[in-house]
Amino acid sequence: MEDLDGHPLYSCNRCRNPIALRHNLLSKSFKAKSGQAYMFSEVMNVVVGGKREQQLMTGRFVVADVACNKCGEVLGWKYLKSFEDSQRYKLGRFIIEKSKILKEYS
């Protein structure tokens, strides 16, 4: 885990476990089941679940759920494969639902 002193971060809304640093936030313009979601280049303190094929608004993907490693709350998903060339920029990135995280300062 990186040194978090003074860095804005996002933490699990349920247990306050640090999930992502502000500088890893790529976009706030994504949608998920609960509404608004954020795309991150990297996250921490999570468990990545099994792969599954999923039809999303922007196409078909292979994704895996991402859950907090402390409380088990499913926070979003990771893009593993895209079936559309125009969506390949998402591969390896994480979508985290805004309602599942808090913005904090360490």
Image (cartoon, rainbow, N blue to C red):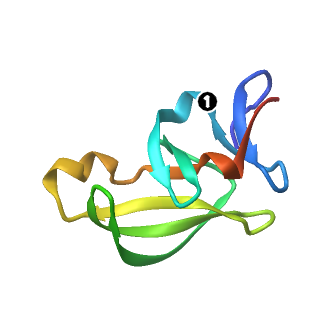
Indicate the position of residue 83 as horizontal and vertical percent values: 19, 65
- In the rendered structure, the answer to whether residue 18 lies left or right of residue 33 reads right
- Residue at figure coordinates x 28%, y 55% from the top left: 58
Indicate the position of residue 26 as horizontal and vertical percent values: 45, 34
Amino acid type, mark 1: Arg
**View extreme (front): residue:** 35
Camera-side residue of 97 and 33: 33
**View extreme (left): residue:** 85
Quadrant (top left/top right/bottom left/bottom right) for the C terminus: top right
Indicate the position of residue 3 as horizontal and vertical percent values: 74, 32
- In the rendered structure, the answer to whether residue 9 lies left or right of residue 84 reads right
- Residue at figure coordinates x 64%, y 50% from the top left: 44
Mark 1 lies on a secondary structure that is helix
Camera-side residue of 62 and 34: 34
Indicate the position of residue 70 as horizontal and vertical percent values: 80, 63
Placement of 29 over or under 97, stated as above or below:
above
Instruction: Please count the marks in the image.
Output: 1
Placement of 39 over or under 83, stated as above or below:
above
- In the rendered structure, the answer to whether residue 13 lies left or right of residue 92 reads right
Count neighbours of disc 1 (C-alpha within 10 A) and say few if under 14, some if 14 to 19, many if 20 or more: some
- Residue at figure coordinates x 58%, y 47% from the top left: 43
- In the rendered structure, the answer to whether residue 65 lies left or right of residue 85 reads right
Q: Which residue is mark 1?
A: 22
